[in-house]
Amino acid sequence: MKKATNSKAATLKFGSKTIELPIITGTENEQAIDIRALRKETGLITYDPGFVNTGSCESEITYIDGEKGILRYRGYDINDLAENCEFVEVAYLLVHGKLPAPKQKEAFSKHLNSHSMLHEDMRHFFGNFPDHAHPMATLSAMAVSLSSFYPELESIEQRENVDFKVTRLLSKMRTAAAFSYKKSEGHPIVQPRHDLSYCANFLNMMFWTPVNGYEPDPVCVKALNKLLILHADHEQNCSASVVKMVGSSDANLYASISAGICALWGPLHGGANQHVIEMLDRILRKDKGNVKKVLARAKDKSNPFRLMGIGHRVYKSYDPRAKVAKQMCKDVLAQLGVNDPLVDLAQKLEEAVLADDYFHSRNLYPNIDFYTGLTYRAMGIPTNMFTVMFAIGRIPGWIAQWLEMKADPESRIGRPRQIYTGPVKREFKPKHI
């Protein structure tokens, strides 16, 4: 791993003591104060709720500039990757640090196909989940249970064998996701096919039945590739941080990925795409599509209502992924001949938000969740599967982050500090019977 360079120092004065804290600089000239010696030298710790100003590691995987709306994987702009690559190529890029040559892509794709089936005994799990179980609950359970059925992967440490571990997880989690949908529909499980690509295989496992003669639509296959690429990694976000926090305890990759899925499930993270659709549906039904009324509610501080899919913790300009997702949504609906009133409402809502100084002054713009759910909906993917789709896309990023952490000699078990605000020492008085 390329290390950040040390340059200059920050001076901290506390009481009668003055210390020098190194300034480290990344390859994109991001600068950070190295506070590793802070507590040792001063007895102080930093206070940073949500860790919004705290760098937990050095990383070569993903670069974000929230002010300029930049997102790059391993140096490649997200727009270029979404336009020119398949998801399996981007997965390879995140894990290996470079795009695959044709032979490498072919070998990686063969690995994905050969490891796509689940152990037959795992299928019994699906019979024990209730039909109404959320697919994210099923997916997280499947992820951690893989360690029981494929324990040999835990002993694979050699970097040259990393594809074995990566492709098994990517393939089997995709299969488990499709199976969970079939279970919720009461349909027979569809096994993966050797002659289909990664994304086409997933759509086939989702929608083929013995009576419909389903064939994956190239329009949907292309859209799914783009959607998964947009979701593939996003630096040290909530779920990636959870994956690494769990992994820092030396827990196996399966447990770490399962924890990441649970973190992604939250409506303030990956679950937002599902909540955007539900919000738009409520606005259409209850508010009759009255955008002005909805914006007034959103700006009312006493009202708990919030606009889902608007604003982002990192991006203070238009989310670059949202730009791609918006255009893709329009293209998919046009090519499939779908007329969705929620899309019209979303566009009106976006235009109103962008024209309103309240949102502009607070740097609140549409994020990736605003349009991705609408595209999934047009493709026939049900709302409760949206976050599962996000998880499938994010798995290579989680794996890359986990592997990088394991290879980092400065990595330590995650253990944040706190500022205690509870009662001071109290006298214990025994009760006599």
Image (cartoon, grey):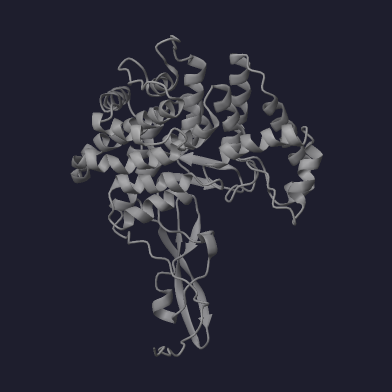
Position of the C terminus, as image quadrant, is: bottom left
* Residue in view at x 49 percent, y 40 percent: 72
The answer to whether any part of residue 235 appears in the image is no
Q: Position of residue 196 (x, y in %)?
A: 36, 17
* Residue in view at x 63 percent, y 48 percent: 316
Q: Position of residue 31 (x, y in %)?
A: 50, 59
Count of labels shown? 0
Task: Name the residue nearer the viewer: 377 or 222.
Answer: 377
Residue located farthest toward the front when viewing the structure as drawn: 433
Q: Position of residue 127 (x, y in %)?
A: 34, 32
The image quadrant that residue 3 belongs to is bottom left
Task: Name the residue nearer the viewer: 38 or 149.
Answer: 149
* In the depicted structure, whether residue 84 falls above or below residue 151: above
Left or right of 180 in this view: 383: right
* Residue in view at x 28 percent, y 26 percent: 117
Task: Name the residue nearer the viewer: 124 or 136.
Answer: 124
* Residue in view at x 51 percent, y 78 percent: 422
The answer to whether any part of residue 329 appears in the image is yes
Q: Position of residue 383 (x, y in %)?
A: 55, 32
